[in-house]
Image (cartoon, rainbow, N blue to C red):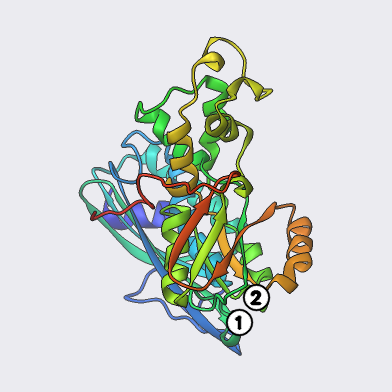
């Protein structure tokens, strides 16, 4: 199968939202009236971002999901994407499943694949995504104000905990791992939330490298500090068992594995700086509190206030007793 046969068979779809899509030297796009284009690029590399034997359908989903999450953080409506992919070989069964996972999520969010590139090499996946947002309503990192509440969507740490299990850093029971694995392999980009926060959130970012690292980008851009309440951070029952050491309290856990000791320090590290959550962290004036809770209810998505923006620089995390919580690192860094 030639390179162009591969593209036609697995990655060519109709693109009615583009003036010109796959098949030429470049795509042609037209932004809607009053909107600007939001553009982001993410690369996933085998051995760094995923295991070489990763399920190709789930990998197709995640390859696009991490880019959709960037659109969500800007309050943008995703429209188009390009995919550059390096492949060790033209494995048709793998390509069938990967493209199915990619396009299933693309269809869910109205995204058209308009171009890209293929080459032979170590497995490497790179998506550039393009969305639209009204120019005055784009969410940025630089708008947080002193007194703003800090919020997060969903729950934190499950993806990092599942990855820690796969790396042998902790031992989860089958039930515990299954409860966390979906967050790692099939993250749900919060696109609808990002659009709903236009005109409400003062700043936003998606949590890819860890809560502290990504909130830190907001603080740097806004020249402000933050105070977080660790007890307020939203976590799943499995993660709460890890953090508190009360794993047996999780109703879905039973048997010998449930009696194994929880790794309290690892649990806190996963929640604060584990990354791969792809939830939104955002700030908003306290007067918008009830409005934000209403948005969460409408989307059936938990939205949780976890702290506030304060004067100064940096982020301080306190436990229920007021003592500082200090993880080993603030988040993932490709070049530490």
Comparing 125 with 323, the one in front is 323
Is residue 303 shown above or below 257? below
Label 1 Cα neighbours within 10 Å, binned few <14 / some 14-19 / many ≥20? some
At label 2, counting other C-alpha atoms closer than 10 Å, the crowd grade (few under 14, some 14-19, many 20 or more) is some
Viewport quadrant of the C terminus = bottom left
Residues at marks 1 and 2 touching, judged by CB atoms closer than 8 Å: yes
Along the viewing direction, whichever of 314 and 128 lies nearer the viewer: 314
Mark 2, residue position: 198
Name the spot of residue 195 as percent of width and height, x first.
Answer: 64, 70
Q: Between residues 13 and 174, which one lies in front from this camera angle?
A: 174
Q: Which residue sits at x=61%, y=67%?
A: 194
Residue that appears at 73% across and 58% down:
296
- Give the camera-side residue of 255 and 14: 255
Which residue occupies 31% across, 37% down? 52
Q: Is residue 254 left or right of residue 45?
A: right
Q: Is residue 44 left or right of residue 177?
A: left
Tag shown at residue 57? none
Residue 153 placement: quadrant: bottom right
> Residue 284's x, y, as percent?
64, 71
Residue 57 in sight here: no
- Where residue 120 sits: x, y (%)? 21, 50
Left or right? Give the position of 270 relative to 255. left
Residue carrying label 1: 137
Residue 278 in percent (x, y) is at 51, 53
Q: Residue at x 56, y 68 (%)?
A: 309
Q: Is residue 253 shown above or below 55?
A: above
Label 1 to label 2, Cα distance in Å? 5 Å
Circle 2: element type: loop
**Helix, strand, or loop for circle 1?**
helix
Q: Quadrant of the rendered structure where residue 115 is?
A: bottom left
Q: Residue furthest left?
A: 121
Q: Is residue 245 visible?
A: yes
């Amino acid at each position: 199968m030639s390179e162009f046969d591969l593209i036609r068979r697995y990655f060519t779809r109709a693109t009615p939202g583009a003036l010109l899509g796959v098949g030429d030297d470049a795509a042609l796009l037209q932004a809607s009236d009053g909107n600007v284009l939001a553009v982001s690029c993410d690369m996933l590399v085998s051995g760094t971002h995923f295991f070489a034997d990763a399920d190709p359908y789930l990998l197709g989903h995640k390859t696009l999901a991490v880019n959709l999450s960037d659109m969500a953080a800007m309050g943008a409506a995703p429209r188009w994407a390009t995919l550059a992919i390096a492949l060790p070989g033209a494995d048709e069964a793998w390509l069938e499943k990967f493209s199915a996972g990619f396009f299933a999520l693309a269809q869910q969010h109205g995204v058209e694949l308009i171009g890209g590139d293929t080459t032979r090499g170590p497995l490497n996946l790179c998506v550039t995504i393009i969305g639209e947002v009204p120019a005055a309503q784009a969410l940025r990192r630089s708008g947080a104000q002193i007194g703003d509440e800090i919020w997060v969507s969903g729950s934190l740490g499950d993806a990092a905990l599942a990855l820690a299990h796969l790396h042998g850093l902790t031992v989860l029971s089958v039930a515990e791992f299954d409860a966390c694995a979906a967050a790692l392999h099939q993250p749900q980009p919060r696109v609808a939330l990002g659009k709903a926060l236009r005109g409400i959130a003062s700043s936003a970012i998606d949590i890819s490298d860890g809560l502290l690292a990504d909130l830190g980008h907001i603080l740097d851009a806004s020249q402000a500090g933050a105070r977080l309440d660790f007890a307020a951070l939203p976590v799943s029952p499995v993660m709460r068992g890890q953090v508190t050491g009360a794993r047996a309290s999780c109703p879905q856990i039973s048997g010998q594995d449930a009696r194994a000791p929880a790794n309290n320090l690892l649990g806190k590290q996963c929640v604060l700086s584990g990354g791969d959550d792809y939830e939104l962290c955002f700030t908003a004036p306290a007067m918008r509190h009830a409005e934000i809770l209403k948005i969460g209810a409408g989307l059936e998505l938990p939205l949780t206030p976890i702290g506030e923006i304060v004067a100064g620089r940096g982020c301080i995390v306190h436990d229920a007793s007021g003592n500082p919580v200090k993880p080993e690192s603030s988040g993932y860094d490709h070049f530490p």
